[in-house]
Image (cartoon, helix red, strand yellow):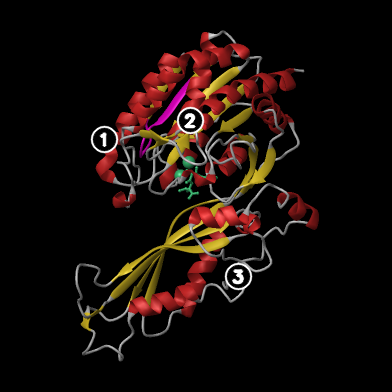
Amino acid sequence: MQATTDYLEQNKARFLSELMDLLRIPSVSADSKYKGDVLRTAEALKQRLIEAGADKVELCPTKGFPILYGEKIINPALPTVLVYGHYDVQPPDPLHLWDSPAFEPVIKKTELHPDGAIFARGACDDKGQMYMHLKAFEAMMRTNTLPCNVKFMIEGEEEVGSDNLGPFVEANAQKLAADVILISDTSMIANDVPSITTGLRGLSYLEVEVTGPNRDLHSGVYGGAVANPINTLCKMIASLHDENGMITIPNFYDKVAELTAAEREAMNQAPFNLDKYKAHLDIADVAGEKGYTTLERASVRPTLDCNGIWGGYIGEGAKTVLPSKAYAKISMRLVPHQVSAEITELFKSHFEKIAPASVKVAVRPHHGGEPVVTPTEGIEYQAAALAYEKTFSKTPIPQREGGSIPIVALFERVLGIKTVLMGFGLNEDAIHSPNEHYGLFNYYKGIETIPYFYQYYTELKTK
Ligand code: BES
Ligand code: MN
Ligand code: MN
């Protein structure tokens, strides 16, 4: 695959400017005011996929945003790689915390990215990582080195729960038939410590509403005599963890797969510097479940977090009010073998039970997804490991991660296909945060490494 590496070398500037153009379109799937921009992104990407050399390129309509499909079948007898990614991005808020506008990409050097990084919403998650696959494909096409068949499925609703992807996959199982799914939408340990993601957490996401009196009240006239739903909600949320950082919902841990001592030892051998971790986040100490390391807490243990909380008066100055309602958004990250719908139900019944008679509560489930663990034996992992060894000159470390890509479990269930997670982002790249960025090193290294995966996978599969 020296040919594709040479091709990359000759086309670096264009590969970068194309990504910057893509990052200028604010494809925020969560907010309807960006609807036209999300659609424009899909159209732009469709053109890029056609130019790269794919056949049968189409935007498949769904109830929500379209799914981009394209393929190159060079020989039906050869293996097929199905590439998945997403072109939608998280909302850029809070805007005032960005050093430069979220949709005006700029390149700046950072401590971890001395060669420069592109700063923009979606730079890493997932436009930058997804676009590497189009460019790697282009490189293989132009150098006549594509060793197998490839299919692309790029969706526009990942950041809002992929509601329409499941039905699409079920209805198009034949069209999507493949031997392996390849995704770059996760992290690696460091630029000089390549790793392959071998697990993702599941998710239960819900919203709660606590109602006290039937209207906002004067906090002097009624304060002290009527339940304040904000006070009550805070107390209820606080009660969901005990003093050891464990979640107090009955039966929450029933199905949690505990790691063996050997597995724990292996995972804690991965390079990790707690002082650097704390310094990067500007925190004096970490927090979490007693008896587990930071690496374990952030990947193989389940969590419960309040993602947002609101109610009452938040405008300028003071308003003495005892609000009628308080709200919160709650996420729970799940690990094998917890089941999203079951955990949502456990939360709901517990939360309703702990509510005092002075308030009413409503729990509204949002989206969810199941956890996954991908095998380290098997030619899928082996091919990926060989590819990293080739381009990093180092053996990658298998690493389970804390984020969620709910569709991975569904691919396995519906299509019966295993996924390889070749993520090239860093945890420090600030995905979902202000100043999200993606290293130029990572972008180019991904484009360099992907063709080797195709080559080794085809060799191992056809041998
Ligand atoms: N790419 C992330 C998931 C991720 C990030 C996995 C880093 C591993 C490491 C993905 O776009 C994402 O943000 N997923 C959501 C879940 C979804 C249902 C909204 C998440 O994890 O919050
Ligand atoms: Mn993503
Ligand atoms: Mn994301």
Would residue 267 be found to the left or right of residue 367 on screen? right
Tell me whether circle 3 and circle 1 mark residues in contact (CB < 8 Å).
no
Can you identify the residue that label 1 sits on? Answer: 36
Q: Residue at x 69, y 41 (%)?
A: 398
To which quarter of the image does residue 310 belong? bottom left
Given the image, on which type of amino acid does mark 1 rest?
Answer: Gly
Can you identify the residue that label 3 sits on? Answer: 246
Residue 373 in picture, x, y percent from top left: 66, 45
Asked if residue 31 is positioned above or below residue 327 in the image, the reply reads above
Q: Quadrant of the N terminus?
A: top right
Residue 440 covered by magenta stretch: no
Residues drawn in magenta? 61-70
Looking at the rendered structure, which numbered label has been put on residue 440? 2
Determine whether the residue tagged by mark 3 lies in a helix, strand or loop: loop
Residue 42 visible in this rendered orientation of the protein: no
Would residue 99 be found to the left or right of residue 297 on screen? left
Which mark is in front, 2 or 3?
A: 2
Q: For the view shown, which residue lies furthest in the right direction? A: 262
